Image: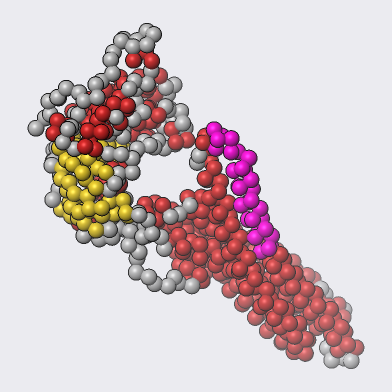
Amino acid sequence: MDTQHDAQRPEKPDPAPWRTLLDHARPHRRALLLGALLGLVTGATGLALPLAAKALIENLGRDESIAGPLVVMTALVVANAVIGALGGYLLRRTAESVVLGARRALTSYLLRLRISAMDRSEPGDLMARVTSDTTLLREVTTEALVGFCTGGLTLVATLAMMGWTDPVLLAVTLGVIVLAGTVLGVIVPRINKATKRAQESVGAMGAALERVLGSLRTVKASGAEAREEAAVHRAAEDSWRQSVRAAKWEAVAGNTAGLAIQVAFLTVLAVGGARVATGAIGVGTLVAFLLFVFYLMSPIQQVVGAVMQYQTGSAAVLRIQEAQRLPAEPVAAPAELPGPDEAPLSLAFDQVRFRYADDAPPVHHGVTFRVPARGMTAFVGPSGAGKTTVFSLIERFYDPTDGRIEVDGRPIGDWELPRLRAAIGYVEQDAPVLSGSLRDNLLLGNPAADEDELQRVVRTTRLAPLVERLPEGLDTLVGHRGTKLSGGERQRVAIARALLRRPRLLLLDEATSQLDAVNEAALRDTVAEVARTTTVLVVAHRLSTVTLADRIVVMDAGRVSAVGTHQELVGRDPLYTELATTQFLTAEHPEHPEEAGGPGGRGEQPEPAVPAPVTVRP
């Protein structure tokens, strides 16, 4: 039995969000430390201003020159602005680097996700985690990590200076700050909860939008624009409600800090004025202390902002951690494509059982067959028989729940994934084409292919007329998902892409279903020629393709009901006989009236239900 490809990694608790944030920031620790140091210097210049102001006032009271204190104050103001701007730029630049690193790491992980994990996920939500959630790390890095440290140290230094200036007024100030801190302690958990819900709603909105845009033609053809628009709007409104709720608590927290400073200022002014009146302190001391109180607003806001940003960032980190808990394939270096002299692969399924999920019905109920190296094997059967799933298991998009699969005599689980997939060319049922140029799509599986090889495959798959017709030839953009190409052209592109990989095993899942009769016949001959030197597996519904196969595997309801050639199966296997007289015949009917002997047609007759015997290659 193969190792479960979809098995979860050993369960272990995720690190606390602050540890994850530190992990993201660790590669940039020098820049962050320098930025923090500049922030502390900025804070120190600010703390020196009240002392310079005190000296200026005292000089005025003694009729002494104020030029010295004025010069010092001017220098401190300029230094505060310049150093603050430099430190702010450095921190913002470093924060962007943290976001870049997080996006790279998460994108790399998502591209290695197992197909089973993608089946259970919403692509739009995963995209939101890469874009929206990672963006939140920017503010967390500068405000939560650095801001908390620099703001906290500056706050402690400010309080120390205030205590040195007048302990009584410091006690009054601390009383107000403690009261405000108690209020913030009640508010902060609400910010965390609201922020997490806001980020989840952003992911839900992205999933709803991706669902519509990914099937826009179907939505339009069904006249469902208004209903789908309402669904996306509901998701957007939910995101708005959650974001507004988070903004409400953040505003309360921010204003609580500001109110505390104002109350402290007024209280210090009242108490300090009384102390000046009694002669306990001088006017210069009171002015300096009031400036300290005014300056206290900045580090307090830094600390409060850091706490709020941490709540926002921790919600984003939790969502990123959720994505990184999805089952993924192991990291491995890309494998080289097969050389021209490498032998084709053999294949064997032995009592293979499979279901897509634990709560899903079984797809395979003990599938067994053998395919020798070289030649063409066709898989036929009614819809839902499990034919495409056979190809998914060969590519190790999934692993069987029971049974054994061997490739070239080795258990498929013993193959390194890159090496296994490098030996396989796979043409999917819907023949997807990516945005970009036609050349990019053809070279997707073998970017090192030279121009001669590329042109040869273009001619072989009858893409040459298309290339000549396109305004920029192979460099013409094909549009999103190949919308500028017809269905048949996309299938030919997919076949050419697979052939350029020089596969030892070629998988064709209804690869010619959208081709016209002429192109289908030409590519059928091409596939037959390829089968002379490699192993070809095809899922086919056209009788002309099936009769060319060296062997036919008949599947029904997740089981193999028969294996043989066309001549052996007709009349011996009831299901194959039924398919040959109904489904295959229907599939062979020409799509255009002129091909069926209509006006201007050639008068060709449809192929009989059971054709004359054909010669099968050994």
Q: Tell which residue pokes out farthest to the left in this image.
A: 618
Q: Tell which residue pokes out farthest to the top in this image.
A: 600
Residue 433 colored in magenta in the image: no
Describe residue 391's horizontal placement relative to residue 24 as left or right: left
Please state which of residues 21 and 3 is positioned toward the viewer in this rendering: 3
Q: Which residues are magenta?
A: 219-247
Q: x%, y% of residue 167?
A: 74, 89
Task: Tell me if I can see residue 493 in this picture.
Answer: no
Work out which quarter of the rendered image holds the N terminus and state it.
Answer: bottom left
Work out which quarter of the rendered image holds the C terminus and state it.
Answer: top left
Q: x%, y% of residue 484?
A: 46, 28
Q: Residue at x 50, y 41 (%)?
A: 214
Residue 240 colored in magenta in the image: yes
Describe residue 409's horizontal placement relative to residue 311 as left or right: left
Q: Residue at x 76, y 82 (%)?
A: 176
Q: x%, y% of residue 322?
A: 46, 63
Describe residue 59's horizontal placement relative to residue 321 as left or right: right
Please state which of residues 437 and 617 is positioned toward the viewer in this rendering: 617
Q: x%, y% of residue 267?
A: 83, 82
Query: Magenta stretch mostly in which secondary structure?
Result: helix
Q: Hey, which quadrant is residue 560 in on the image? A: top left
Q: Residue at x 38, y 37 (%)?
A: 430
